[in-house]
Image (cartoon, helix red, strand yellow):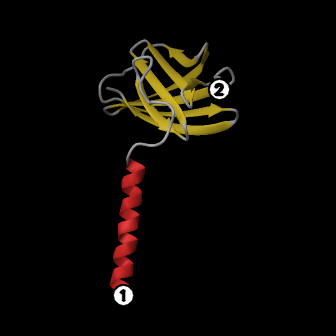
Amino acid sequence: MKTQAFLASITLALAGSVFAAGKHDHAHEHKPLHGGVVVEVKDMDYELVAKPTAIQLYLRDHGKPADVSKASAKLTLLTGTEKQEVELKPAGDKLEAAGSFKVGPGTKAVAVVTVGGKPATARFTVK
């Protein structure tokens, strides 16, 4: 009897993880709209567009552009053994920084984004 209960709990746990890994029930897709890399954190989509002269971060809330007029972000770029920190500021419908950035395929980026006083962390790998 204990074995059956144990197997049943394992089966339920695995079924839950398979369900969570599958498609989720949203009305929007997580496709890049600006040629960047998209990740989802707490129902918000973050799209990072990283170029050698500009870094842009677009935010979408349930598929619609989020108001970033009072938002800010600190981005950490990791390319090989090099680390670069970048402050992103509102620029129209996105957060942005201009300068010289070491980005390329495989560059890792961690963004700490603050919207409405609430921070969220998004992690990216540049393609």
Q: Which image quarter holds the C terminus?
A: top left
Residue 53 - label: none
Q: Which image quarter holds the N terminus?
A: bottom left
Residue identified by numbered label 2: 71
Label located before the other in sequence (1 or 2): 1
The secondary structure type at the circle numbered 2 is loop
The secondary structure type at the circle numbered 1 is loop
Residue identified by numbered label 1: 1
Residue drawn at x 40%, y 22% is: 36
Residue drawn at x 48%, y 41% is: 25
Corner quadrant of residue 117: top right
Closest to the observer, 8 or 30: 8
Q: Is residue 102 above or below residue 14?
A: above
Residue 55 at x, y = what percent?
47, 18
Residue drawn at x 33%, y 83% is: 3
Closest to the observer, 80 or 1: 1
Badge 2 crowding class, 10 Å Cα cut-off, few under 14, some 14 to 19, many 20 or more, is some
Badge 1 crowding class, 10 Å Cα cut-off, few under 14, some 14 to 19, many 20 or more, is few
Residue drawn at x 63%, y 33% is: 114
Corner quadrant of residue 65: top right
Closest to the observer, 91 or 47: 47
Which amino acid type is shown beneath numbered disc 2? Ala
Residue 88 at x, y = what percent?
56, 22
Residue 24 at x, y = what percent?
45, 43
Farthest bottom residue in view: 1
Q: Give the mark toward the camera: 1 or 2.
A: 1
Closest to the observer, 34 or 11: 11
Marks 1/2: CA distance? Answer: 56 Å
